[in-house]
Amino acid sequence: MGEGAIAGTRRNGRIWRRVTLAWVVLVAGCLVGTSCGGNVAVGTKALRLKACTIDGLAAYCGTAMVPEDRLTGTGPRIPVRVVVFPASSPRRVADPIVWVAGGPGDSSVDWIPLVKPLFFFNTHRALIFIDQRGTGGAGGLTCPSFSSTVPDLSHKAALRASVDKCVARLKANLAFYTTAMAADDLNEVLGDLGYTRVNLVGISYGTTLAQVFLLRHPSMVRTMTLLSGTLLSVPVLERFPKSGQDALDTVIAECAHNVACHRAFPNLSSDWSALWNSLLKGPIVVRASISPNHQTEMFSADSVAAGLHQLLAEPDTEAAVPIIIHTLGTARNRGAAMVAVAKALAKARVVLGPGSTQEMIKYPIECSEGWARNQASGLVGRASFEYHLDLLTAQWWHYVCTLIPRPAPAALYGAQRPSPVPVLALNGLADPQDPPANMAGARELWPNSLELAVPGQAHDINWQTWQSCTGPLVGEFIARGTVSNLDTSCVATAHGQPFALTLKAIAPGN
């Protein structure tokens, strides 16, 4: 079973990933960049797209070749996959919607089957997916994972060897894989497609890339929508301890005000205290006789903190946090209770813990860019359940970053500047990574902006809330091109997923 069965390492950046589904999204239909049996093409002479089918939907697909070294334009060119879904209405509008994926490291194209349904409200605009350099398909930069559930610097020589081997085998100059260079790729591809103004919709790290795009190419942006984002000036990783604790406190408070949840777990706060105090004294031990692996397993406070943070980030799994806390906090045999929790999560297809591979573009980005500053001395929230884990993480990154090629200053973005572009920012009140507080000051930067705190919203999108409220709100914002007089009344009544009141309810139907 191992620690990874219940406690895992979140991505050291901001994420948008369906950890509740233990499968990799595959793009159906054609392989982007190859012929799909159609001869219809769109675009300009610089970039021609061919008709294709993606997840059963008609689209246009292609691959742009951009210079890896954008500073000089010399050297090798790298592939960037492109998919365009044309507007379905005959009354088409010229400025498209551009999805900006999270990570750093998520492929926009690979996530089309999950993301495309979010834009059910859109019929008048083309919907565009452009991979960030270093992600997706043949252009993806990945290596065998050298991270672990709990960051460990006790074997620096082995870690250094793993990182050095990874960097050497990539055959890519990581110093050019920055957010600024990705923003310039995006601008080039959109220009090659013939667009002069676009509507950006970014999530998690995608909001970082969107902000950098606005900074570097302001005339291209008609509107910008930021989902679960943080201002570039805010060191989001250093706020992780406080953000995580605030999210946990929010869930516990929401349970106390929910009749069914409070009836099932009347002392949830005490249950948490009992569990955490026990973990601080020593790990939960799962004896070999009851372990699915037939080996003794131990779950430390740090490994449980890592898993809890990841559970809090997802709407579905966040709804299971009270039953998990209650089960572990009140158990006389916490080892047996841990096995029961792990089995329930497995039935729900929840995957926690580090994967076998990792996207490497996050390293030059997070080791060099201000938004990702992660100094141990800057961590906020010393009383947080994940403070010690985040301290270890900051120390681990400080060492690993010394092994990663550093970008030149010209490959990085500069200071943010005020912009009149309309901006809509939506942040979840229960987000353990990018809470509403991380958008404080947005109006000073963007006077035509609106920041909304969404009740019951975790880091990732709550489909029910999106379908009934926030999705149409984003659609109205893009259609009108202004935040003025938007009807935001539905946000006040938004709520999270129904709480799971039993372990079996974590995976209904299984």
Image (cartoon, helix red, strand yellow):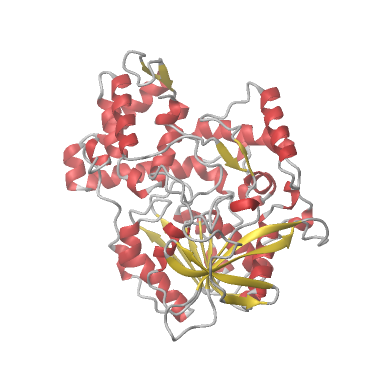
Q: Position of residue 263 (x, y in %)?
A: 16, 40
Q: Is residue 459 left or right of residue 47?
A: left
Q: Where is residue 466, by image quadrant?
A: bottom left
Q: Residue at x 33, y 36 (%)?
A: 345
Among all residues in the image, which is located at the extreme front? 37
Q: Position of residue 341 (x, y in %)?
A: 31, 30
Residue 270 appears anywhere in the view: no
Q: Residue at x 64, y 60 (%)?
A: 80
Residue 369's place in the image compared with 483, above or below, is: above
Q: Position of residue 418 (x, y in %)?
A: 62, 70
Among all residues in the image, which is located at the extreme bottom? 91
Q: Residue at x 78, y 55 (%)?
A: 76
Count of marks, rendered view: 0
Residue 93 appears anywhere in the view: yes
Q: Is residue 357 left or right of residue 270?
A: right
Residue 358's place in the image compared with 302, above or below, is: below
The residue lying toward the viewer, choosing from 24 and 353, is 24
Q: Position of residue 157 (x, y in %)?
A: 70, 23
The residue lying toward the viewer, choosing from 447 and 324, is 324
